[in-house]
Amino acid sequence: MHVSKIRKFFGILGPGLISAVSGLEITNIGAFSYIGATYGYKLLWIIVFASSIMALLQQLAVHVSVYTREGIVSEIKRIVGKKIILALLILLILANIVTVEINLIGVAFTLQLILKIPWPLGLVSTSLIVLAISLQKEYKYLERVLTIMSLVLSAYIFVMILYIIENPGEIVKIALSITIPPKTPLKELFIDILAIFGAAAAPYALIFQSSSVIMKGMKFEDVPEEFLDILTGLVFATFASISIAVVAAAYAPPNTSSIYEVILALRALGPYAIILFSVGVFASSVLAIEAIILCNAYITYEYKYLTLSLGDVVKSKVYGLSAFLTIIFSSIIALLHVLLRECNEYGFIDMVKDSSILISFTSWVPALMIVILYWRIGESTSSFVKIVSTLIVGGLIAVNIAGIAALAGL
Amino acid sequence: MFIDVGLVLKVFIYIVGGFIPFLYNYYFIKKRVDKESTEKIIKENNKTLSEHDKLRLNKVTGEEEKRAIEPITLSNTLSLHYLRDERTTRNTATPLYVLLVIDQNTMNNPEALNKVISDVPKIMGSFENKK
């Protein structure tokens, strides 16, 4: 291979791997570990499918943002009116708060496991640390350190590769996972599929994709390059997600329920497993929470004022208020969640499932906003993509309504 | 022959709902961008040529010429065989490219233009000596 091609390959590999691994947080790790431990490889294809849908929606977010030149919140507000956009934003903020809540629980339970700190104390101290970081406003250096720390979660990829080298026949089973029907009752299966969608969705990611395009002042001719970045992200994120499920299928106990059993999936790493997991989860959770705080501030700010810059948002009073309220509400919901489930760290997976399903219920909100704008821009849009994206959003809404009905026992 | 309808449906949703739209949209946009950039280049070239013709045909006054913002157009590339980059590690020396930015007045004056081009080896030589 030519030197420049090798350089180019590693140029893509580095950032792709970093963004995929640092994008993993406790929702993904918990949900995919549960799926791997419970279903083996049978639902791997759903993880890939959910990731590819997210990638298509990211493409549309980029395309729409190039043409609108305003934030998607401002544009949608103009189309659907103040009341509807307010309802959509409340749903989105709720999904974000639920994501923060489960991340706080994950860190608190991990601290309890490794340092014997009682989880309520761990929860409060983690909340205060995260709030202090976000109120600092300028934390680029810390962000880099956390990103590097979160890279230890690539241990999942490492363990999966080791497992496949030892058992080469597994690769065929993984590839043909779609052909194996799961033998779980339909209702339970349906709810678990919703949990996968919730874990893969990360609704705040679409808002960030859109705001970064607007801030960069990206032109239409730059869009294919951005699409290539999304493709790289898709490949790596799917690879990282699959590796969690495969490793859990191989090593985790079948009825994985506690955070300790989730870590057991990494037992091939010996005594380092628990340390690597704790460091990675702490770093990735803090990164995710900081990103969500910024997202909440951004959408609230954009609802009130017209802005093209995240910098304006960070400098505004809305940011501090958003950070404070997000952390307070998330901590209260986290406490209530653990108390209502009447469990300690042994019911951790159930809590991850609850949160993923709740996130899934609102995952269609940013998707709907983007698809509406895609229909509106008209320029350089494809009819095929219009139809497919509408079916996807319609499908997401239908599946979520069915999910609510299933949970209600209907 | 028995066909598992559920499996066919799963595979159909998997491919048509996930990968195909993603890849299709990428190639669709790429094609559009390529088409738009080609159209833009053709438009720009036409604009440059027409402006050049207009300047020549209308015999713009000296005063107006001075005020006009002159476009820099790469009209031709000229290989100077005797100028080669000797610093290369390869066995054969690679051609050394020199970019000359020449204003409109010099371009219109063949003598001045010849002088500038013939001075290039001298200027390059003086750079080498300075090292």
Image: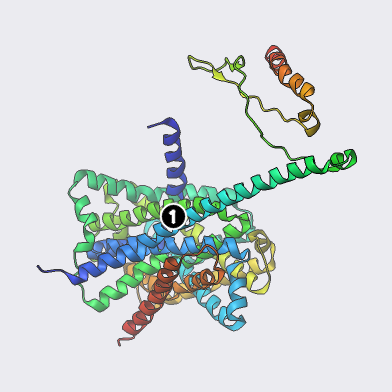
Given residues A190 and A397, the one toward you in this image is: A397
- In the depicted structure, whether residue A163 falls above or below residue A358: above
Q: In the rendered image, which residue does mark 1 sit on?
A: B27
B16 displayed left or right of A174: right
Horizontal and vertical percent position of residue A214: 61, 60
Give the residue displayed 31% in from the left and 62% down from the top.
B15
Quarter of the view holding residue A133: bottom right
- In the depicted structure, whether residue A359 falls above or below residue A290: below
Give the residue displayed 62% in from the left and 57% down from the top.
A215
Given residues B54 and A237, the one toward you in this image is: B54
Total numbered badges shown on the rendered structure = 1
A399 displayed left or right of B52: left
Horizontal and vertical percent position of residue A407: 33, 82
Look at label 1 and name its amino acid: Tyr
Identify the secondary structure beneath mark 1.
helix
Horizontal and vertical percent position of residue A364: 45, 73
The quarter of the picture where the C terminus of chain A appears is bottom left
Chain of the residue on which disc 1 is drawn = B
Quarter of the view holding residue B45: top right
Horizontal and vertical percent position of residue A109: 40, 63
Given residues A205 and B57, the one toward you in this image is: B57
Give the residue displayed 26% in from the left and 48% down from the top.
A268
Quarter of the view holding residue B126: top right
Q: Judge the density around disc 1: few (<14), some (14-19), many (≥20) Cα neighbours within 10 Å.
A: some
A395 displayed left or right of A39: right
